[in-house]
Image (cartoon, rainbow, N blue to C red):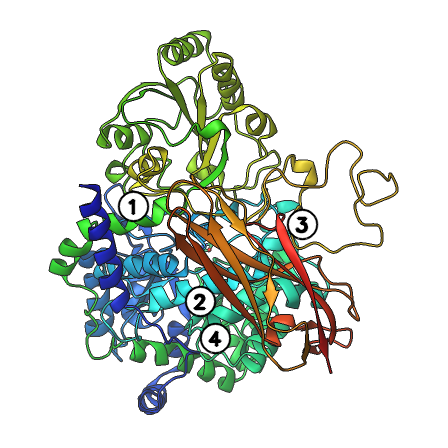
Amino acid sequence: MRKQYSLFLSTITCSLLIISSLNAQIYRPSAAVEERVIKLLDKMTLEEKIGQLTLYTTDWGSTGPTIREGYKNDIRSGACGNLFNSHTVGFVRELQRVAVEETRLKIPLLFGFDVIHGYKTIFPIPLGEAASWDMEVVERAARVAAIEATAAGLNWTYAPMVDISRDPRWGRVMEGAGEDTYLGSRIAEARVRGFQGKKLGDPDAMLACVKHFAGYGASFGGRDYNTVDMSERYFRNYFLPPYEAAVRAGAATVMTSFNDYDGIPATGNKFLLTDILRKEWGFRGFVVTDYTSINEMVNHGVAADEKGAGELAINAGVDMDMQGAVYQRFLAQSVKDKKVSMLQIDEAVRRVLRLKFELGLFEDPYKFCDENRQNAQLLSAEHRAAARDVARKSIVLLKNNQDVLPLKKSAKIALIGPLGDNKSELIGNWNGAGNADDCVSLLEGLRNAGASATFARGCEVEGGMSKDDLAAAVALAAGADVVVVAVGEKAMMSGEAASRAEIGLPGAQSALVLELVKTGKPVVVVLMNGRPLAIPEIADNAGAILETWWLGTEAGNAIADVLFGDYNPSAKLPMSFPRSVGQVPVFYNEKSTGRPYDPNSKWTSKYIDMSNSPQWPFGFGLSYTTFQYSEPKPDKTTYKKGERLRVAVTVTNTGKRAGEEVAQLYLRDMVGSVTRPVKELKGFQKIMLEAGASKEVVFTLTEQDMSFYRHDMTFGVEPGEFEIMVGGNSSDLKRVRVTMTE
Ligand code: NOJ
């Protein structure tokens, strides 16, 4: 049975991959489209042009999306050319009909939505998927999301979010790929490929939107919407590369961020939107604002009024105004006042129209409106199986004392905790059109696997714990062979506007776990949350810990797969887990400082009340087997600038079962014209090894991998000594030195 299931999953992997693109590259409008755009533009009034730069949201009724009459009239008059939060075939078809049958120029609408980790079949939150370190898995999840979303009327997703963040207080870390620039860049590319498919114009391809440009993840204090400021060097070295990677992978649109950078809000920031994005990277798609972020420039204090904010935005390079209606209300006047040129407006309109042509909307405005396709594809068995596979590959085993895990299916399991029998939180925040009812709870997952499990809540996610609830939980634990405790956050505790100043388990959940530990039964903690948590007492006292994030529709089945060893966990943390919020930001690629940490010397860079190290470092994750690494072997120890360096390492599965391992390569530039991090991820490979088997993994490092923004702000290498480090996480590494000569 299990074999058949694996076969089923691998068949799905293959069939989905055939339709995915392997050769995505920077988006370039085609010549044929250009001609049509110019002809259309010639016919447009200024008001119709501004309409193409206007984007409105629909609202939510009890049964689905609804649209304000005013917006519908704006579509009819050509004053609104794009909508978001409008989906499902019937709803979209009617609005598209208004656009292509009732307007003068019959220009079809774009329909956008936050398809972040699935449309109807919900996949793990992006931070969880990132933990798979498996680009095929990440691409596949985005591909399924696009297949479903385009079957439900959509043609534009507001993803991928590629903001690097080193601050788990920031709720939006759940939407990204974590703290690392290199891993984040590879994931950004994979997601763009997945959403946009083989080519724009295919019936299951949608526009990707790289967000939030730029630096949104570095908001001071981890507080959402807060200020961002840092040196340009730091910004370019660590924060910008994932956006660039996504653009180079072909992302058709970019969304601005709410924050300012170096004193200028991103939405009015010409340096970001024109100099870097368009001139340096050659981006040819269009830029949309985040929700009312033009209007918010008045609050930022860089514009006296909304009209001025609109002028700042369009002159900086913003093409489309999301929900703020600033362009709609003021742009024509700004043109009359000569604050904005017609050239600028025409260019923005061309960028939007090109993509409408590329999508094939002028040939068939209803191409994403096929009821049969919608019925067949949403939540199909194939998609659910893919979601289960991605979910189990996203689970990180953080602790497994005395091999508590995997469990026997015959064991008597006491499932305890507020999230044990829960569905609604498991689809996480930004859950598209997902329904909690379609989700498999952990209790169901255990039972589906054939195990006998009894359940007690113990406490709620928030608030205190009643004596009765605790007594019932302890009694259940006492009669069981093993206790599985499902604790974590509610979905709304991470995501937008969900920063937390304390990042422990909310409410009485820690106390519940510690009470269960006292029973003397083995305790397996299953964490369900959207950010790294600081849980030192649980780290010390639990028998085993699984980080399961919010895994989506198939959560319960996927967790059961790992708990029972039907899948051997292989995921690794994409973000460090601190011991305490006081250590934040704590991340692996820090600088050495002039007084590097020395536990025996007071006058070094450290805390007097806690170690510098995180609870679990970036790249960390256990398996039910063990792996050993040989010393890394470079193909030469001295090599010339411009040459490639190959580094080989042999990884051996020293345990008793087959497993996957993510071999990671880090680099340190020993002496630079500016201070350099103590290590930086520059390569990783996920390999499968049978018990006892060994495999040589070869990494190739290029000049680009060793390059950075040097003292004079040029990007390049500085020959000299480098340390190469290889291992299974960012702190447990084997090292070798090499020298690059001029
Ligand atoms: C605001 C969020 O910051 C952004 O990520 C999202 O895409 C838009 N709202 C639209 O929902």
* Residue placed under numbered mark 3 in the picture: 220
User: Front-most of 79 and 626?
Assistant: 626
Q: In the figure, residue 276 lies in which quadrant?
A: bottom right
- Tell me which numbered mark, 1 or 4, is placed earlier along the sequence: 4
- C-alpha gap between disc 1 and disc 2: 22 Å
* Residue placed under numbered mark 1 in the picture: 388
* Residue placed under numbered mark 2 in the picture: 189
| Pointer 1 local density, CA inside 10 Å: few below 14, some 14–19, many at least 20 | many
- In the rendered image, is residue 6 in sight? yes
Are the two marked residues, 2 and 4, in contact with CB atoms closer than 8 angstroms? yes
Q: Quadrant of the C terminus?
A: bottom right
The local secondary structure at tag 3 comes to helix
Q: Amino acid at mark 3?
A: Phe
- C-alpha gap between disc 1 and disc 4: 30 Å
Q: Which mark is residue 248?
A: 4
The local secondary structure at tag 2 comes to helix
Residue 196 placed where, x, y %? 34, 69
- C-alpha gap between disc 3 and disc 2: 27 Å
